[in-house]
Image (tube, helix red, strand yellow):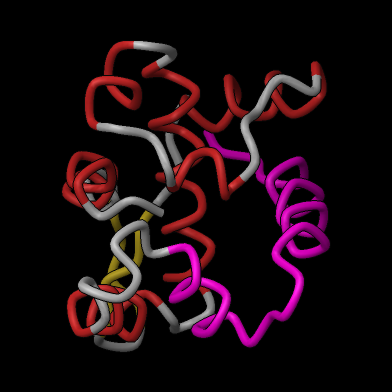
Amino acid sequence: MRPRAADRPFAQIFWRSRASNGRWSAAGTRSAESLQAAIRRGSLPTFRQLASTTSYQFYEQDPGTNYAQSRYLLYYLQERGLLVRFVREVRRHHREDPSGYVTLARVLGERDLTAFEQRWKAYVLTLKFP
């Protein structure tokens, strides 16, 4: 995930949040519904494509889908206790991995992000928010 393109999704991940056991966690938003529709249509870019977007491409050439995909990838990481590690690793390895794609795979413990993407999409399709 391109760090520049993650600023808004990251900043708003806790926009609707809840506290549980002394930890804040993000709550879902209506953008989940549009993301689910895009998954069903088969119109999402791959994580590799998303990570390689420029800021202009991210925000101007399908900003809703790009934003929702990024937000719910960050949400997924947060729900598994990996978000803080991911942010730290992206910052630490920015020179050798400016897109954050390799770092994402490492933090997830995945060799094949294509296979992970399919599992992530299945996970997103199960999300239900008020």
* Lateral position of residue 120 relative to residue 69, left or right: right
* Residue 84 point in image, percent of width and height: 29, 81
* Residue 91 point in image, percent of width and height: 18, 76
* Lateral position of residue 101 relative to residue 95, left or right: right
* Lateral position of residue 122 relative to residue 48, left or right: right
The quadrant the N terminus occupies is: bottom left
Task: Tell which residue pokes out farthest to the front in this image.
Answer: 96
User: Of residues 112 and 28, which is closer to you in this image?
Assistant: 112
User: Of residues 6 and 55, which is closer to you in this image?
Assistant: 55
Looking at the rendering, the stretch of residues picked out in magenta corresponds to: 101-130
The residue positioned 39% from the left and 12% from the top of the image is: 61
The residue positioned 31% from the left and 61% from the top of the image is: 18
* Residue 112 point in image, percent of width and height: 76, 71
The residue positioned 63% from the left and 87% from the top of the image is: 109
The question of residue 94 being in magenta is answered with no
* Lateral position of residue 118 relative to residue 74, left or right: right
In terms of secondary structure, what is the magenta stretch mainly?
Answer: helix
User: Of residues 3 and 94, which is closer to you in this image?
Assistant: 94
The residue positioned 35% from the left and 70% from the top of the image is: 97
* Residue 119 point in image, percent of width and height: 80, 59
